[in-house]
Image (cartoon, rainbow, N blue to C red):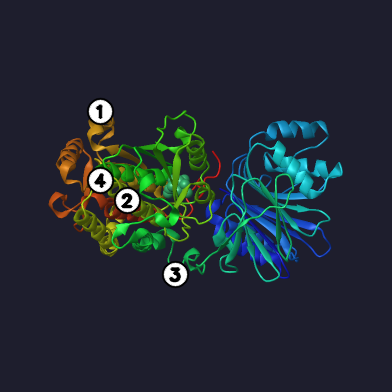
Amino acid sequence: MCGIVGYIGKKRAVPILLEGMRKLEYRGYDSAGIAVRGADGNIAVVKACGKLANLEARVEQGAPLEGGCGVGHTRWATHGEPTEANAHPHRSMRGAVTVVHNGILENYREMREELRAKGYTFLSDTDTEVAADFLEDLLLQGLSPLRAISRFMHTARGSYALAILFEGHGTIFLARKDSPLVVGKGEGEMFIASDVPAFLSRTKEFYCMGNMQMAEVSAEGAAFYDAEGVPASCERILETGDGAAAEKEGFEHFMIKEIGEEPRAVENTLHAYLKDGKPDFSEIGLTGEFLRADEVVAVACGSAYHAAVVFQYVAEKLARVPVRTELASEFRYRDPILKKNTLVVAVSQSGETADTLAALREAKARGAKTVAVVNVRGSSAAREADFPLYTCAGPEIAVATTKAYGAQLAAGYLLALGMAHAWGRLSDSELSRYTEELLALPAKMESVLSRAEEVRTFAKAHASVRDVFMIGRGIDYAVCLEGALKLKEVAYVHTEAYAAGELKHGAISLIENGVLVVGVLTQSGVAAKTRSNLEETKARGGKAVTVSFAEEGEEGGFLLPPVEELFAASLSVLPLQLFAYYVGVERGLDTDKPRNLAKSVTVE
Ligand code: M6R
């Protein structure tokens, strides 16, 4: 959701804040703002609607903002429209407290009414302004900033990452509940961000704040506290990346750069957990005892859910163990039934998705062992799951996931093979055949990507398409789910993914002249059936096109290199990702920052 940055040190804060915000703009981009404390202790706030460029222009035009301490925010609106009044930072009525916030305060209405009764008035529709006034009210009652924040943490419900400037205090205060916040350590300077990439080019040393923690950050360091104000420790991570992954490096968009990085993401993920030709998760403690679960439940949202559906098909086939995939947002509220020996696998790029985290916690509370297939190191899911199984996609910046999805598929294959091996369902020779197939995947993915031009040409010719169906069966259907989401997200094209056999049970009534029907046909046992369903759509005016191996191909369709069918999703999704990207570009859209979306969905 929203992006938070902060800086305190000897340098001028403004360019550093804006640099961090540029790197985090993928988290939210409907408005932005900064607050800087000047040498005189006064705090100046500048805000602008729309993308960060508007704020940068406003900062440039205004009086120079000096000062080495400040906070910044890129917003994804939750409460109140994306207006300047609703943009962060928010100040308390008397100006004693300035706040940037990521998350939702669920009881802000009650808090606001109590403050109103004390004479507070409000300039915005946001929950965040209430937090600023709430803290100011406590300061006026004589509480210190830390005690005021502690009281806030015991009063506010919902989620928050807060960076706070208090008048008369030269430091930055932080509070975190269910919304990520990291503190980067430099030489005589400190950085604050919702996500590591913001300042990866400036430091490699980060502290990942724990849930229900507070912090006070000065130029020399950070002191962490629990919600009672008792000093607490904080997990420290040393990042190895150089921040280059967070740069476009000459590409027009992050999305196309990241699609190009997908083979490497898969390769790195495979190498992380393949030892001597066998899946080996002992490094994270995930041994045979846990892999021999009687049942597996995968929980996730969006694309991660689609990757989990592929995992379900592959794992059931290989391990012969029931695997259920559930939307995390449904799982968390439906009183799910878990067996004694159920393994719950939460899949998440960010490791901060509110619903996925809640599902993970629900599973733990019910006694299940949990695996988090997660891309961001040190994220909440990684820290809270029993077994953090990292995908190695590197930082993903485009809001629409591509390479992280590819890496999730790879992690799913490994997990499925690990389960099958633990259950003794595969002979050594079968296992090594599968692992060889896996290791051959990145080169085959490269060969598919080398034909991106074919997809671009097709996308150009179909850029004005209004309705698209993507149909397939089994793993092909799972890939259609992802292909359809991509086209919706970045090209704003109405697209439906349908299990091919379901089409004639209703939705076929929507097929008419001009509807594009993409058939994914990589599963030999069912490809002919999907082919018949495609014919049915053609007979009704649909324009059919296929993604398939040579023998099933439609004229003009996209042909994939041969691959083990169980792993075909890693190839067949590529032309669909490229198609979405090129249609988005043809339509003149910002494919990296689609409207209404944010990268990391930390609210329900
Ligand atoms: O960070 P996560 O993998 O948990 O995110 C889950 C979804 O929000 C995410 O996959 C979303 O659907 C993307 N916009 C897909 O491109």
Residue 591 visible in image = no
Residue 303: % across, % down: 40, 46
The residue beneath circle 3 is 250
Looking at marks 1 and 4 on the same chain, the residue that comes earlier in the sequence is marked by 4
Q: Amino acid at mark 3?
A: Gly
Does the beta carbon at disc 4 come under 8 Å from ligand 1?
Answer: no
Q: Amino acid at mark 1?
A: His
Does the beta carbon at disc 2 come under 8 Å from ligand 1?
Answer: no
Disc 3 element: loop
Looking at marks 2 and 1 on the same chain, the residue that comes earlier in the sequence is marked by 2
Q: Amino acid at mark 4?
A: Leu
Q: Amino acid at mark 2?
A: Gly
C-alpha separation, residue under disc 4 versus residue under disc 3: 42 Å
Callout 3: few (<14), some (14-19), or many (20+) C-alpha neighbours within 10 Å?
few
Residue name at image x 18 percent, y 53 percent: 549
* Image quadrant in which you'd find residue 310: top left
The residue beneath circle 1 is 505
Q: Nearer the viewer, mark 1 or mark 4?
A: 4
